[in-house]
Amino acid sequence: MTRIARPVNAELTNSLLARALFGRACIDCPEDVLDRVFAASTLRNYETGEYVVRRNMESANFQLVVSGELESSVTYASGHRHLFGFLRQGDSSGVAFLVSGGKHLFDHIARVNTTLLLTPNSALLKEMQGQPALCLSLLRQLSTRTEVKYAQVTLDPSVPLATRLAWAIQTLGRLHGHRRGDSIVLDMKLSQSDIADWLGVSRQHLNPHLKQLEKNGVISLGRASLIILDRSFRAYGTAAE
């Protein structure tokens, strides 16, 4: 007898996944607290290219990526985009504004169809009053993302581009890479323009440096992909000590 598979309830699936990811983000927090915060949250879907938040918009929610991918960037009046990073499944944003409020510093744009769990700041703040574990979990998330952004904006522009590129690739590998044998595969679409905008240089200026790394067997480039073949490099195949 042939059984006809019933369609999976996508909304229920996303809800269960969101609850699991929220629990992972707020590890060690009591389940009843997580349940109350989750009950106050909502799931929202965004299409590719849609703005989740815009720069200078008042921050009202803690955002957790359930599926998909966001970019954090600023596009200036000249049309130039400065890319500051990516948010992927399990990543969150908005922690910095929980206590003091404020306006978003970057645009958050869906790079693919994306689902977010949006938690009102007020719901988190209410539980944080008597939950040190929740506070510590959120602080850890803030610390990790702040470390990357500070490292990026304080990187001396006089440092050779080869060295800055090595830092960028290693950082992307640490945050978004998956081991495959001796290599690290970035499980995301990443164009040369993305890397150039992250480093604040033109694609034409960046391209020869990427090609040199590929020639030296450090990376493998695809149309919109990058694989790190040598995890220990610093720049142009120089091995880390």
Image (cartoon, rainbow, N blue to C red):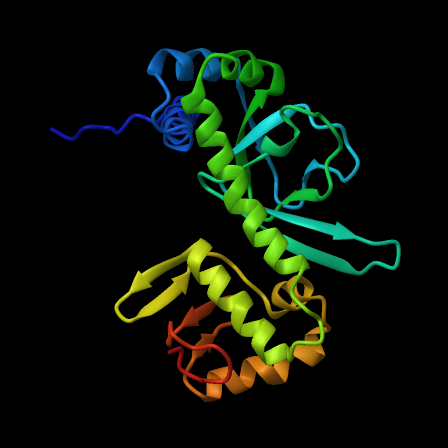
Residue at the spot 51% in from the left edge and 68% down from the top edge: 169
Residue 167 rendering spot, x and y as whole percentages: 53, 68
Asked if 46 appears above or below 71 in the picture, the reply is above
Number of numbered discs visible in the structure rendering: 0
On the question of residue 65 being in view, the answer is no
Where is residue 32, by image quadrant?
top left
Where is residue 25, by image quadrant?
top left
On the question of residue 21 being in view, the answer is yes
For the C terminus, give its image quadrant: bottom left
Q: From this viewpoint, which residue is outermost toward the right?
A: 77
Residue 114 rendering spot, x and y as whole percentages: 54, 39
Where is residue 177, by image quadrant?
bottom left
Residue at the spot 61% in from the left edge and 39% down from the top edge: 47
For the N terminus, give its image quadrant: top left
Left or right? Give the position of 140 relative to 119.
left
Asked if 101 appears above or below 186 in the picture, the reply is above
Residue 68 rendering spot, x and y as whole percentages: 50, 43
Compare residues 167 and 178 and report the one nearer the observer.
167
Residue 182 rendering spot, x and y as whole percentages: 28, 71
Left or right? Give the position of 160 relative to 126.
right
Residue at the spot 68% in from the left edge and 69% down from the top edge: 156
Asked if 156 appears above or below 213 in the picture, the reply is above
Residue at the spot 83% in from the left edge and 54% down from the top edge: 76
